[in-house]
Amino acid sequence: MAESIDEEMPEEALPLQQDLTCPVCQGIFRDPVLLPCSHSFCRDCLQRSLDFNKKCPLCRVEFERGQDISNRALSDACETFLKHSTFRPNTKRPSEDTCNLHYKPLELYCEKDEEPVCVDCVSLHSTHRLFSLKDGAPMCKRELNFKVQIFEKKVELYKKTTLKLSNAVEYIKYQAGQAEKQIKVEFKRLHEALVTEEALRLKALAAEEEEKIAAIQELITSTNNNVTALNELIETIKNEMDNDDLPLLRNFQNLKRKAQWTNTDPALSYNSLLDMGKHVGALSFKIWKNMQAHVKYNPVVLNPNTASPWLSLNADLTAVKESSERLTVPDNPERFDPCVFVLGAEGYNSGKHRWDVVVGDNPKWIVGVCKSTVARKKKFTLSTNRGVWSIGLSKGEYTASTPERTVLQVEQRPERIRVKLNIDKGEVSFWDGGTAKHLVTFTHKFEDTMYPILGPGLNATPMTMAPGKIAVHTS
């Protein structure tokens, strides 16, 4: 900081003093620096000025930090002047109401820099509008009051958002309860099917066990009868052998005829034992294969978090219809509102995919695919330009969602619409799922993730995602 001369100087020294005075602090230069615009300032004064902007305090020409250089000639002149002059350092310290640069009262307000200044700062703000503190304070209060109003509105908005978030928490709990209920229902059904399968297999095992044991028991009985008959024959022969020679010889031929045994020797037959391969071989696979009758596969299931509040989905997310009243659901970003649509739960960005939608006799519906970025919170016309490739029925007319609304010629009213999506080939085609008749094909380079989209219209008849076929392949 420069030092100021408080005592009166000789009249002839005043011009020199003015030349050696810093225009900012109004004191003799101390460690002066020179700017590219040729103006000089105390190094500390310039540093304070840089806190506001990077312009020369006098001519307001911009400069970069580091372009200022030490003005050694001016510094030497100031030191010489101070040595031969009577002075005392300025020991005043700025207060809160005093300018940090000039130590004078802050009496003005700069509208551009939005700060109070002293009268000596006027040269630093020559192009700015300056007001008295009395006039400047209301201006600042008006602006702050406007900010307060904005913040108060935000407080109200945040309170409403907090309520919505609390409702979302309750809805998540409701979803968890519904999911838990559905999981238990499905596992109970499958468990009952497994118990039934187990009972049938145990019954078949017991039946074969009983059959095989009965066959062997019959063979044991037959063998025991043969043993008895053989023992009787042996006793008869032994008794005859004890006779005299002549009676034995006379009866030999008859005795020889009696000593014949034509019965088959007892032995286990083929397949006498249990067929273990039939009962326990690859048992889990056989059970799984038989469980196909109890398992339903859907290529597409619906995402309830995207469904319009006017749509109601069934428990396993395979059917959608109009709700009799607007449902209380969170206003999450992915939900359609006000448009009455719902998306599939899975998106596709490669490969081939196919699914059928049962539209039945609904008088109005939309079936197709759309980009993940399709609009959710505003009404829009379905079109390929909007990222939707679909066909629909409305007022008895079938149309494709081209920008010009292409009318489709349909001879027989389809009750099932088949959608074939080939991402790699860039095609999505629509077919009559009952007659396999082609309706229309769109071509496009699909670079976004594509989702099935349904619009059942406002009618009570549900649209249903048809189950797919299950095939077991082994190798």
Image: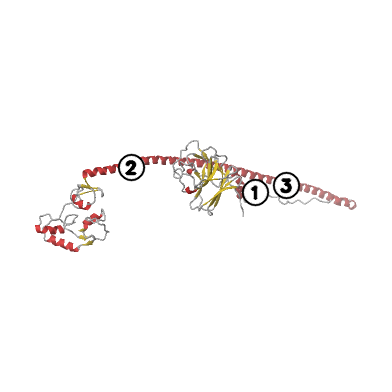
Q: Quick check: can you spot residue 161?
A: yes
Task: Name the amino acid, label 3.
Answer: Ala
Q: Earlier in the sequence, mark 2 or mark 1?
A: 2
Compared across the picture, whether 444 is left or right of 141 comes to right
Return the x and y of residue 390 as percentages of the image width and height: 52, 46
Residue count near mark 1 (Cα–Cα under 10 Å), binned few <14, some 14–19, many ≥20: some
Task: Name the amino acid, label 1.
Answer: His
Q: In front: mark 3 or mark 1?
A: 1
Compared across the picture, whether 236 is left or right of 467 comes to right
Q: Do the residues labelled 2 and 1 touch (CB within 8 Å)?
A: no
User: Considering depth in this image, is 427 or 279 the residue closer to the camera?
Assistant: 427
Total marks shown come to 3
Identify whether 61 is placed above or below 320. below
Identify whether 14 is placed above or below 410. below
Return the x and y of residue 358 as percentages of the image width and height: 57, 43
* Helix, strand or loop status at disc 2: helix
Task: Name the amino acid, label 2.
Answer: Ile
Question: Which residue is at the far top?
Answer: 324
Q: In which quarter of the image is residue 74?
A: bottom left
Q: Which of marks 3 and 2 is nearer the N terminus?
A: 2
* Helix, strand or loop status at disc 3: helix
Residue count near mark 3 (Cα–Cα under 10 Å), binned few <14, some 14–19, many ≥20: few
* Label ID, residue 279: 1
C-alpha distance separating marks 3 and 1: 20 Å
Question: Which residue is at the far left?
Answer: 10
C-alpha distance separating marks 2 and 1: 77 Å
Q: In front: mark 2 or mark 1?
A: 2
Q: Quadrant of the N terminus?
A: bottom left
* Label ID, residue 150: 2
Find disc 3 in the rendering and name its residue: 215
